[in-house]
Image (cartoon, helix red, strand yellow):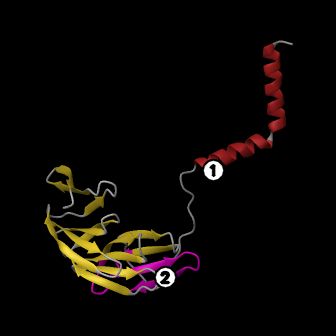
Amino acid sequence: MTISKLTRNGLDKLRCSAGLGCLALAAALSAQGAPLTPGEPIVLEKTTGKFDFIRIDAAKRRLLLAHTGNKSFEVFDPSNKVLETWTTVPATNPHGMALVPDSETVLVAGGSGKLALINRSSGKMVASADIAPRVDEMAYDPGLHTAYCASAQGKISVVDVASDKLTAVGDVPTTSGLKSIAVDTKTHTVWTAYAKGDQSFVQPFTPGK
């Protein structure tokens, strides 16, 4: 028997014997190729309006929500579908937030010009500090224990973060309307992104010694 016949016979046997198995494999591969499979939407009772930021507290398996439409900070437990509203006063109208990975706390920046440090287990306010008003995004550098809050007033508010204390270091001037900020936790460089006229920019900032 020639190699070509062997190959052809082998393919014929594969086609005949595989049957539904091939179809099942194709279906499995197709399912694996799906980028996301949607679940059912969950209605959040007794709350309305749009959200600004969402973060995941992986350790406690909860969602942390800056709910600008409701001007509140909310915590959602997907396992029992319980929604809690935590006070962030004096950091009212919460926007940006950042988990503090080396502690049980989360930072919440209020549009009111205050940064709050909140215990992620109890929801208790631990500390607060002054920042520039109209902060949108914020970033936290766990290596330097420092928070950076981007204000639309053209300032980056810098705050030292301790386990139970926040200390405002000062404001760094930047472009007006700033909203986007991130920190490289390896180099500790702070990056911002903004637009001016018909041009777009990114700008690095190096922390002081």
Is residue 21 something one can see in this rendering? yes
Q: Position of residue 168 (x, y in %)?
A: 21, 76
Q: Which residue is mark 1?
A: 31
- Residue at horizontal 68%, vertical 47%? 27
Question: In the picture provided, is 52 more to the left or to the right than 132?
Answer: right
Query: In this view of the protein, which residue sits in the foreground, 173 or 141?
Result: 141
Lateral position of residue 123 relative to residue 185, left or right: right
* Secondary element at tag 1: helix
Q: CA distance from mark 1 to mark 2?
A: 32 Å
Task: Report if residue 87 is visible in the image.
Answer: no
Q: Nearer the viewer, residue 159 or 58?
A: 159
- Mark 1 or mark 2, whichever is nearer to me: 2
In the image, taking residue 184 as reference, residue 207 lies left or right, namely left
Question: Relative to the observer, which residue lies in front, 199 or 45?
Answer: 199
Residue occupying the point 24% across, 81% down: 129
Residue found 71% across the figure and 44% down from its top:
25
Residue identifier under label 2? 83
- The numbered disc on residue 145 is none
Q: Position of residue 58 (x, y in %)?
A: 50, 69
Up the image or down, 165 lies above or below 180; here it is below
Determine the secondary structure under disc 2: strand
Indicate whether residue 80 is drawn in magenta. Answer: yes
**What is the quadrant of the C terminus in the image?**
bottom left
Quarter of the view holding residue 6: top right
User: Which amino acid is tagged 2?
Assistant: Leu
Percent position of residue 44, x then y: 48, 79
